[in-house]
Image (cartoon, rainbow, N blue to C red):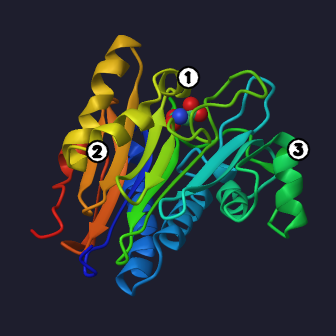
Amino acid sequence: MDETVWAIVVHGGAKTIQPDTAEAHRRGCAIAAEAGAEILRRGGSAIDAALRAVRILEDDPTFNAGQGSVKNAAGETEMDAAIMDGKTLAIGAVAAARRLANPIEAAAALLEAPAILLVGEGADRFGYNIGLRCIDPASLPASPVQSPGHDTVGCVAIDRAGHIAAATSTGGLEGTLPGRVGDAPLPGCGFYADDRIGGVSLSGEGEAIARCLLGSRVMRAMENEPADEAVTVIFEPMDRLAAEAGVIAIDAAGRIGIAHNSDHFALACASSACPGVISAIHQNELKVSEPDD
Ligand code: ASP
């Protein structure tokens, strides 16, 4: 791995973005990507960069994650989050958490634990016990400000040592059954990272993404193709299931790939080839860069 190469890409959900929130989506993604890029530029780790970027997106009420999350059919917020270290294949994930202010922090803490996924009260209790900020679910805003549709945030990063991390966090889909868990905390569905191949983070209709292991399909394609070609494998299975999805990816050479069949996909990226952050609400707005451009 060339030690000058680093890259980060973040997403703020595959969905329809109303014109009056387009700028908030671009700005929110740009701020998160810049915070992660700043870590990578000075030689920090991909895990730290992805964690920082996703925590910022969780804290931004524009996005359906963390405290900005939508309500389920019982009027409750349930959040899923996951992070993966492509160096060790360590995974940390939480699902249907209700009290964690930043579910991605609990997921990151689990990278060091034997368990890879904690759900519901177990996830909340784990976060509380290690001193993470917890909130009263009843104190969350009754009417989230996000655009209608589905939504998730995520990040994939590669650091100068060639280590890759992927992170995904979501409030899930609005109005679903209490206890419903989508693709976001499931490896090979909403996220995956392996230094030998690359990393992915997805958004979209979680049940459809899980049914066809969409993240895993992109990973498999990246074994033989650069990220920008590999991501196109999402279209056929999503057509078959008549579902919407978006994916961000970085391959082991630091190339970025983005694909979505949703109207919009909030995005931002930066890399050693293109160090300034560029953000967009559609893949066509971005010029995806090569590390040695
Ligand atoms: N994939 C998420 C879920 O199904 C939602 C989304 O990305 O819009 O929970």
- Residue at mark 1: C-beta within 8 A of ligand 1: yes
Element type at mark 3: helix
Quadrant of image for the C terminus: bottom left
Q: Which residue is found at the position 46% from the left and 66% from the top? A: 32
**Disc 1 residue crowd, few under 14, some 14–19, many 20+, Cα 10 Å:** some
**Disc 2 residue crowd, few under 14, some 14–19, many 20+, Cα 10 Å:** many
Q: Earlier in the sequence, mark 3 or mark 1?
A: 3
Q: Quadrant of residue 77?
A: top right
- Ligand 1 occupies quarter: top right
Q: Return the residue at label 1.
A: 207
Q: Amino acid at mark 2?
A: Met
Q: Which residue is found at the position 31% from the left and 46% from the top? A: 281
Q: Nearer the viewer, mark 1 or mark 2?
A: 2
Q: Say if 226 sits above or below 73 in the image.
A: below
Q: Say if 175 sits above or below 35 in the image.
A: above
Q: Return the residue at label 2.
A: 222
Q: Which residue is found at the position 48% from the left and 47% from the top? A: 192
Q: Return the residue at label 3.
A: 121
Front-most of residues 66 and 231: 231
Q: Say if 72 sits above or below 139 in the image.
A: above
Q: Earlier in the sequence, mark 1 or mark 2?
A: 1
Front-most of residues 184 and 117: 117
Q: Position of residue 207 (x, y in %)?
A: 56, 22
